[in-house]
Image (cartoon, helix red, strand yellow):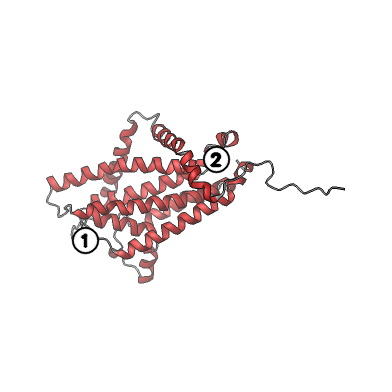
Amino acid sequence: MTAVTPASPSAGRPARPPKKKYLKNFMKYRFLLKELVNKNIKLQYRNSVLGLFWTFLQPLLTMIVLSLVFGQIFGHDETLILNYPTYLLCGRLLYEFYTQATKKSMRSILGNASIIKKVYVPKYIYPLSNIISTFVTFLISLTVLAVVMGYFMIFTDTKMHLTPYVFLAVVPVLILLILCMGVGMILATMHVFFRDVEYLYDVFCMLLFYLTPIFYQVDQLQLEVWMKYALMANPLYSLVSMFRSCVLFGEMWNWNWFYYSLGFSLVTLLIGFYVFYKNQDKFILHI
């Protein structure tokens, strides 16, 4: 009498490709990733009258509003904060990229549920496409920073000036991209199983805005030493500070910021892809 072997729990589900084939699988679907990125960029301002122009206008208006609100408190003395509007814009652009990229990545699996149920596509393509499309619009919005800096350097007596260190600004930007990928993968996985994550993350992003030195300088605050170190534990603190060092202050960044932000981002990326890889086969049961 032949023994009956119990069915595997994963029977009936498409086999997950081995880890060593992930790069080959990614190259196979790279053109789909490109098309999804193009689609996300086109759809972002599809029903807007100004369209892509909002990529330039939104950070500019935000800078003006924050300058009016906080300028007399934190930025009235240029010996304390060099060129406060530019200082604001540097921090705001990086913060906005982080929040928009991670939020879009978080919603990517549920937003493409109908396609995931019908067609096999590596599921990580969806959060990655949202992060990359947001990164492209972020790069476009950096034009506003260049225009604002040019205006102040030409038409005002600001002490701000460009140095060759400005080319190193690409380093914190790329580290921030890595961080967004790691956080985005974690959020995309959590959002499938716990829908409340979306609302909790909105609150977290609002808290993060005040914990990141966007409109203030940590040295200006009357804080205990441990509270300052707690603020510096935020990886966005290091990345924003590195970016400002290159673009605004024209100097080399503090290497402690580099080591900390890079290490934090790489660990987050590894955790994000591991969590996503381990749970992606369960997505179909919850979307």
Judge from the rendering whether residue 236 lies leftward or rightward of residue 26; answer left or right: left
Q: Earlier in the sequence, mark 1 or mark 2?
A: 1
Judge from the rendering whether residue 165 lies leftward or rightward of residue 237; answer left or right: left
Which quadrant holds the C terminus? top right
Judge from the rendering whether residue 42 lies leftward or rightward of residue 60; answer left or right: right
Residue 151 visible, this orientation: yes
Residue depicted at x 81% and y 47%: 4
Q: Nearer the viewer, residue 32 or 237?
A: 32
Q: Quadrant of residue 145?
A: top left
In percent of width and height, residue 91 lies at 31, 52
The residue that mark 2 highlights is 110
Residue 73 visible, this orientation: no
Q: Nearer the viewer, residue 117 or 77?
A: 117
Find the residue positioned furthest to the bottom: 225
For the residues carrying marks 1 and 2, which lies nearer the camera in this image? 2
In percent of width and height, residue 9 lies at 70, 48
* Amino acid type for the residue under numbered disc 2: Leu
Q: CA distance from mark 1 to mark 2?
A: 46 Å
In percent of width and height, residue 204 lies at 46, 53
* Amino acid type for the residue under numbered disc 1: Leu
The residue that mark 1 highlights is 80
